[in-house]
Amino acid sequence: MWLKTVIVILFVGLIISLFTSLNFLFKDRGGIDGKPSHRAWNALSVRLILAGLLIGFLFYGVYTGQLGSNAPWDARYADKIEPTQ
């Protein structure tokens, strides 16, 4: 259960980082001395780190069997479905 909680927290963090970066992109047109602010780049780096962690936890969950697919078209579960006539 902890894995799903971590995945949800990372996904919410990604969404927050995305909108924070968008906000910085619109507001930071240049600093006081005319140099552009680096807050948007910092938010991008945070978003990349969060995305890497999210992908890593997803791979870990699938590898350990804690996450899986119950989709009807998944071949692993084809033998459990009875055909209807």
Image: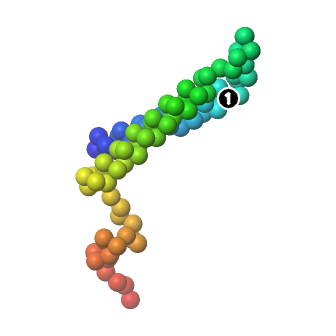
Q: Is residue 39 visible?
A: yes
Task: Residue at the far bottom: name it.
Answer: 85
Q: Which part of the image, by quadrant, shows the N terminus?
A: top left
Mark 1 residue type: Leu
The foreground one among 63 and 14 is 63
Dividing the picture into quadrants, the one containing residue 5 is top left
Q: Position of residue 3 (x, y in %)?
A: 31, 43
Q: Residue at x 61, y 22 (%)?
A: 38
Vertical order, 19 against 27 (above or below): below
Vertical order, 23 against 71 (above or below): above
Q: Is residue 20 visible?
A: no
- For label 1, the residue is 25
Vertical order, 21 against 58 (above or below): above
Q: Position of residue 62 (x, y in %)?
A: 31, 54
The foreground one among 84 and 66 is 66
Left or right: residue 47 versus residue 5 is right
Dividing the picture into quadrants, the one containing residue 84 is bottom left
Q: Residue at x 30, y 70 (%)?
A: 76
> In the rendered picture of this protein, how many numbered marks are placed on residues?
1
